[in-house]
Image (cartoon, grey):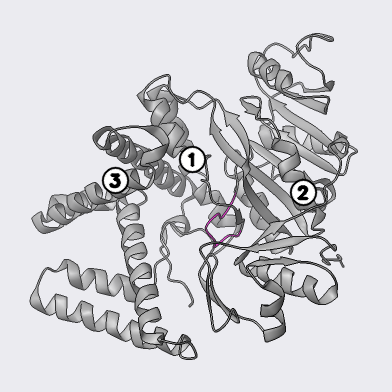
Amino acid sequence: MRNDRLPDGFGVRIDPRVRAYSGGRILIGGSPTRLLRLAPEAAEMIGDGYLEVTGPKSAIVARRLLDSGVGNPRPRLLPSPEDVTVIVPLYNNADGLLRLLAALRGHNVIVVDDGSDQPVCIPSNRGTRCRVTVLRHDHKQGPAAARNAGLRAATTDFVAFLDSDVVPRSGWLEVMLGHFSDPEVALVAPRIVALDPESNTLARYEHTRSSLDLGRRESAVQSHGLVSYVPSAALLVRRRALLAQGGFDESMQVAEDVDLCWRLEQEGWRLRYEPAAHVAHDHRISFRAWFGRKMFYGTGAAPLAARHAGMVSPLSVPSWTVVAALLFATLSRWGLFGGLITLVTALVRLRRVFAELDNPTRISAIYLARGFFAGLWRLASAMCRHYWPVTMLAMIASRRIRRIAVTMAVADGLADWFTHRDSGGLDPFRYVAYKRMDDIAYGSGLWLGAYRARSLEALKPTTPSS
């Protein structure tokens, strides 16, 4: 039985996207969005949006805010960096390893050479100020096995997994370490940014839309949340928590990081994404390597679906959103009428949830509109990404579907460009072109993985339970 008591001095800041009603006693936010009711005493503790743990009662309120996703941690205590061992799985990337070691400062490092063609050799006292131990596999066993070998060899309370093609930025470790003052946190991940964001057009797109970059918003890592997993290119973990789980699944060559996150979550551990910590990644920027990597990521859905039944879905949208969207898509008078009736019915149901608030109809309409347009975006994205082969067949069969599909593909791409327009500087035409190729690559890998597994589980859409 783990002690989940937050220490005195630990802080929780209400997420800026959360809305407070009824004098702060009702909070609406988180991911997925939820309504959180607080006792008057708990609401008073939060005050202007910040709660500091000063005893058992405030610790309980802080834990509830964190677990509901409406609050973000602001720890004041942190373990020592001396309690961290850096583990680097390596395969045929000696130059990347030396670049990484040069960026580390005085750390204990375990390099696991996973059967490289030329055994790794660390120049003594040159280019690095780290204490480096090298383990070698005679034959390549995969990155999961290499990470596990380093995990077993480490003796510190925490281990940081860094791939050989990353370079951590200043302060990366200290920013993440503070989260472990919460005894229930098992894993923290930094934001993965581009090492070279300007070398060509594809590099500029990857700088904006890399599969490894989970954005600027801090978040809990939850299977059905805004951030459902974090990539294994850079992770900081509590060593005993990983050992209890047996480490990474060595039978998985892809998506082993997703599997690990979900297993830790199922065991009751908390996981965090901390975008204030930056680790730069050497992205693939030749088209062939980039397209192949996106396909490779797509093939991971099928083995995940086999291990985590019902948790892998390319599309999760409320049924009322699907019904309304299909009715509107008929472009007929009766379709428009039916879609409006569907939305009004959903509004009435949502109003019951907000009945105790002031202006429940207005608040319900706002959240209904947000949910509907977010659902439309997910539908358009899935149509272009996960289900693009089905969309192509439908376009061939129907002129109306072809017109709707092209419109949604362009609208989805432009909306995505507008959301990320401040990051990469690409014009909308090239951005949308790369976005559609990105989606085709991932979707192709998804269907290929399903074919290899002889299972459609990873392709099944779902509807949220509430």
Query: At numbered mark 2, what does the secondary structure look like: helix, strand or loop?
Result: helix
Residue at 32% in and 35% down: 434
Residue extending furthest right? Answer: 155
Sequence order check, earlier mark of 1 and 3: 1
Q: Amino acid at mark 1?
A: Ser
333 and 79: which is toward the camera: 79
Evaluate whether residue 247 shows in this view: no
Tell me the tag on residue 211. 1
Q: Mark 3 = which residue?
A: 413
Q: Is residue 360 left or right of residue 45?
A: left
Q: Using the numbered discs, state the Cα–Cα distance from disc 1 to disc 2 in whole angstroms.
A: 26 Å
Q: Amino acid at mark 3?
A: Gly
Q: Amino acid at mark 2?
A: Gly
Evaluate whether residue 232 shows in this view: yes
Q: Is residue 30 left or right of residue 360?
A: right
Sequence order check, earlier mark of 3 and 2: 2
The magenta region covers 222-229
Tell me the tag on residue 62. none
Q: Position of residue 109 (x, y in %)?
A: 81, 27
Q: Is residue 256 above or below residue 360?
A: above
Q: Position of residue 123 (x, y in %)?
A: 79, 8
Q: Using the numbered discs, state the Cα–Cα distance from disc 1 to disc 3 in whole angstroms.
A: 16 Å
Residue at 63% in and 67% down: 49
Q: Using the numbered discs, state the Cα–Cα distance from disc 3 to disc 2 in whole angstroms.
A: 38 Å
Mark 1 or 3: in front is 3
